[in-house]
Every structure is written in structure tokens, then in C-alpha cells.
């Protein structure tokens, strides 16, 4: 029996890079869209990954803002946090980690002198290029038999697994889970509003209360609005909508790392809003002994990963 990894998101790519004894089934069938602002915070885990790829980097500062019914600040008040939590999570009592990114300025790792979101993209582009060729199953999955430790493919083949890493939505692993969620509507817009063009020169993203949206992300050539309600207009704040999709807001964290002897790596697989790339690195380190092709430290093709994790 083999070890398998199911998924094609960034967490799946990272696990594929760090762990050697894995057969990959690259499917997005079971995944949920993660719309949290994705950048590379200045943590030891991120620095280790960047160094392992031989990338040049600098530590820079990104800025965020807080829009309290039209009043902009770089420090959120307690009342702002309460209203924000109530509107996005439906409750006042939320975990402290929910507000970890509620800072006016944060350090991030800039790769090739790029901005926070471009650096994130570049890192995973390099990870994908540097993943050592592993076995890959080029077939869609029909279902997962967690009780029988098997994967049923759409072509009828059945794969028995020794261990399995799941990076998709936990609800697709266990259909009996009754998890309360709220829908998030994401609208991708052009930069038509001059005020937003100016804001994008100073800020990377922002949080809002009293608006039709609760989060704004300033990308290089477009702006994203995250909303708890659908809009039927063709613009938001004067910025023309060019694309839209939706995903789910986690309300109550589960923070599961393993279920039915399946290892969980990702925000939606652990059902943990505080999950991050740094945490995924730490999870891979914990799983290294089970997914390492060479059980001894030695001069082999995965030595860089061994040094990286240990």
C-alpha cells in the first residue's frame, strides 16, 4: 500500500515539496476557495522555505486599514472588532487568532522585491517548479472509503492507502458533519475609482463595517470585495465588476489535524480559520516520519527537505 495526497491547492503543493513518500492525486474537486489575504508573513517557517528554494528576499512592511462606517484608521477599536465579528461570524465571542491580521502594519517576506500578493504567488510558482517528480494519478476521484482505507477512482479502480493527506474541504471527507457556515460573495473589479487607486498605493487590504462589503483587497491590477450579501449591481464603489464567485465562511473552528486516520492539511480540511502556510509547514514536520521515503538522514534527493524540516 502507498501513501497518497489528495488536492491541488497551495497546501497540497507545499506538502508535496516537503514530503517524499507520496503519490499525488491532483484534484480540485473537493476544495473550497480560500479568500483570506494571502501573503508571506515574516516567520521562521517562511524564511526556511524561501531559503531552501534559493530565492532572494527582503523583509518589508505592508499596511492595512479599518473603515468604520467611512472613518479610516490604522488601529481597530474594540467596538469595530465586535461589530466585524458579529457581521462575519454571527457572534461576539471569537478566538483571538481571528484578529491576528488586524494590524495597521505587518512584516512580510518580499521575493524579488515584489509586493505581498505577488511574492506569495512567486513562492508557490517556485515550489511547483522544484517539486521532485513523484508518482501521480491522472484520474478523478469518485469517493473516499475512510472505513476501508481506500480511494475509489472514477475509472473504477480502487486504491488502498497506508496513509492519506487530505487538503480539501473536511465536509467532503465526512458527509455527516453538520457545520454551520455563512456564504461569502467575492467580486473582482476594475480600478475605476480614483480614491481606490490612491488607497492601493498605501494599503494592501482593509476591513470594513457599515458597508456592503467587509474586506477589500488591493491587487496589482484589480480590486476584490468580500461581501456577506449578494449585490445585484454591476459595480461596487464605482469599480466595475468583472468577475464573481462565492465560498464559505467558517463560523465555529474544529481545528482537527486527523480524522478517520486521514491527515488534514489546509484551512478547510482542519476547519480552522487561523490556519496558515507556516502552520502547514509545522504540520508537515510532524508528519515527516510517516511520509519520508528514506527513513535515515543521508545524501539523497530529499536531503534539502530533511534539512528544511529539521
Image (cartoon, rainbow, N blue to C red):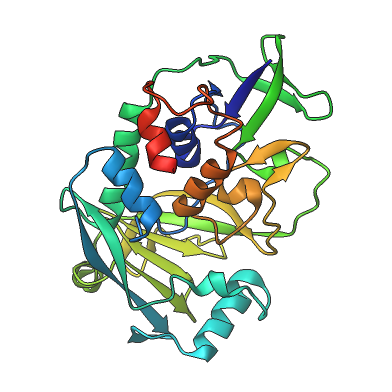
Q: Quadrant of residue 66?
A: bottom left
Whether residue 125 sits left or right of residue 37 in the image: it is left
Q: Quadrant of residue 30?
A: top right
Residue under the point 66% across and 39% down: 263
Whether residue 293 sits left or right of residue 290 in the image: it is left
Q: Position of residue 109 (x, y in %)?
A: 27, 57
Q: Position of residue 246 (x, y in %)?
A: 54, 51
Whether residue 141 sits left or right of residue 219 in the image: it is right
Depth check: 306 or 105 in front?
Answer: 306
Residue under the point 50% across and 22% down: 294
Q: Is residue 203 above or below residue 37?
A: below
Residue 46 in sight from this viewpoint: yes
Q: Is residue 32 above or below residue 302?
A: below
Depth check: 232 or 181 in front?
Answer: 181
Q: Position of residue 115 (x, y in %)?
A: 22, 56
Which image quarter holds the N terminus?
A: top right
Which image quarter holds the C terminus?
A: top left
Q: Is residue 67 above or below residue 196?
A: below
Residue 220 in sight from this viewpoint: no
Q: Position of residue 264 (x, y in %)?
A: 64, 42
Whether residue 151 sits left or right of residue 177 in the image: it is left
- Number of on-image labels: 0
Amino acid at each position: 500500500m502507498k501513501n497518497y495526497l489528495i488536492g491541488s491547492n497551495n497546501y497540497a503543493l507545499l506538502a508535496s515539496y516537503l514530503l517524499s513518500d507520496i503519490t499525488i492525486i491532483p484534484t480540485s474537486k473537493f476544495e473550497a476557495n480560500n479568500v483570506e489575504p494571502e501573503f508571506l508573513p515574516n516567520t521562521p517557517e517562511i524564511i526556511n522555505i524561501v531559503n531552501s528554494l534559493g530565492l532572494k528576499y527582503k523583509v518589508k512592511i505592508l499596511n492595512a486599514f479599518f473603515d468604520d462606517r467611512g472613518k479610516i484608521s490604522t488601529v481597530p477599536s474594540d467596538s469595530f472588532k465586535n461589530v466585524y465579528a458579529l457581521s462575519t461570524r454571527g457572534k461576539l465571542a471569537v478566538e483571538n487568532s481571528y484578529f491576528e491580521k488586524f494590524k495597521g502594519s505587518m512584516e512580510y517576506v518580499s521575493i524579488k522585491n515584489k509586493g505581498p500578493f505577488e511574492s506569495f504567488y512567486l513562492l508557490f510558482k517556485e515550489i511547483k517548479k522544484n517539486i521532485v517528480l513523484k508518482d501521480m494519478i491522472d484520474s478523478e476521484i469518485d469517493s473516499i472509503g475512510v472505513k476501508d482505507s481506500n480511494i475509489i477512482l472514477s475509472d473504477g479502480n480502487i486504491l488502498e492507502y497506508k496513509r492519506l493527506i487530505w487538503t480539501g474541504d473536511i465536509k467532503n471527507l465526512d458527509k455527516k458533519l453538520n457545520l454551520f457556515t455563512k456564504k461569502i460573495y467575492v467580486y473582482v473589479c476594475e480600478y475605476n475609482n480614483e480614491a481606490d487607486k490612491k488607497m492601493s498605493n498605501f494599503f494592501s487590504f482593509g476591513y470594513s463595517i457599515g458597508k456592503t462589503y467587509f474586506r477589500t483587497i488591493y491587487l496589482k491590477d484589480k480590486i476584490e470585495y468580500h461581501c456577506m450579501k449578494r449585490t445585484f449591481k454591476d459595480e461596487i464603489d464605482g469599480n466595475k465588476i468583472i468577475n464573481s464567485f462565492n465560498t464559505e465562511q467558517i463560523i465555529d473552528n474544529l481545528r482537527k489535524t486527523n480524522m478517520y486516520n486521514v491527515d488534514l492539511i489546509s484551512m478547510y480540511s482542519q476547519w480552522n480559520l487561523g490556519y496558515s502556510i507556516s502552520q502547514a509547514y509545522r504540520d508537515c514536520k510532524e508528519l515527516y516520519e510517516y511520509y519520508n521515503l528514506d527513513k535515515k538522514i543521508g545524501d539523497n534527493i530529499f536531503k534539502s527537505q530533511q534539512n528544511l524540516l529539521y
